[in-house]
Amino acid sequence: MVFKDVDRIKAFSYSAIAIGILLMVSGFVVPQLSFPASYTRSGPPPSVKFSQSNPEWTEVFEIPAVHAPATIHIVATKSGSGNVTIQVTSYAYRTNPESFVFLLTNSQPAINTNLVLDYSVPYLFFVTSENSTYSLTVSGNWEAYGYFNTNIYIGGVFVLAGIVSFYFHRLVQQRERVYRKALEEAGIKINNGATK
């Protein structure tokens, strides 16, 4: 029996527990962090030519998850003879989505408004332009995310593995003591885990 294996098991168990605790702490703390940012879009691109057969153009983009409930600020303007419709929705991520629609027209060619979002999920923007160009800016505070809560579960696995490994280490250590005692009683010398 090589007793050095016991030290490897002990080192692994301590390392696994430490990594697990670190990941669990990060899983709780990081989602609480947020950063200010803004997203600007304009369209359609110069390559788009409106006509009777091609009367509208649609852009779809996504903003990251907010730490709900949260407020985002939307500023949009349009230039042209047609309307611009802006739809904000969480439908891709919720079975009961929320959706908001803003319409830019010739009588109201600009909006400057705050929007309260109730879900901590990414939101989709659908911008449909009818024979008009537009400029859109969305600003707010976003989570320093990537759905970091997953690390809580990963950390839990490491902690569990570390505890099981540590328990196994204690069993092996106890067995080692019994084994050493039996060898000593039999008059067999032990040298660095090897017997003579």
Image: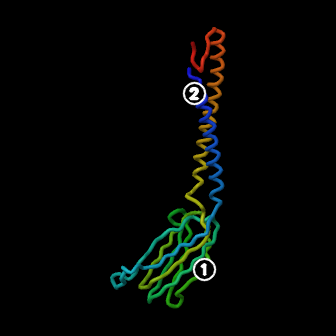
Categorize mark 2 by other alpha carbons within 10 Å: few (<14), some (14-19), many (20+): few
Q: How many marks?
A: 2
> Could you tell me the amino acid type at mark 1?
Thr
| Colour theme | rainbow
**Residue bearing the label numbered 2:** 5
Q: Quadrant of the C terminus?
A: top right
Categorize mark 1 by other alpha carbons within 10 Å: few (<14), some (14-19), many (20+): few
How far apart are labels 2 and 1 at the CA level?
A: 65 Å
> Could you tell me the amino acid type at mark 2?
Asp
> How far across and down, in percent of the image, does residue 45 sit?
40, 79
Image point (63%, 8%), residue name:
187
| Numbered badge on residue 113 | 1
| Left or right: where 23 falls relative to 46 | right
> How far across and down, in percent of the image, does residue 76 sit?
53, 81
> How far across and down, in percent of the image, does residue 20 sit?
62, 44
Mark 1 element type: strand
Give the residue furthest to the left.
53
Q: Nearer the viewer, residue 12 or 25?
A: 12
Q: Nearer the viewer, residue 156 or 12?
A: 12
Image point (50%, 72%), residue name:
125
Image point (56%, 22%), residue name:
2
Q: Is residue 185 above or below residue 66?
A: above
> How far across and down, in percent of the image, does residue 26 sit?
63, 52
Dot in front, 2 or 1:
2
Image point (61%, 36%), residue name:
13
Q: Is residue 108 above or below residue 152?
A: below
Looking at the image, is mark 2 or mark 1 earlier in the sequence? 2
| Left or right: where 123 falls relative to 22 | left
Q: Is residue 80 above or below residue 148?
A: below
Q: Quadrant of the N terminus?
A: top right
| Numbered badge on residue 103 | none
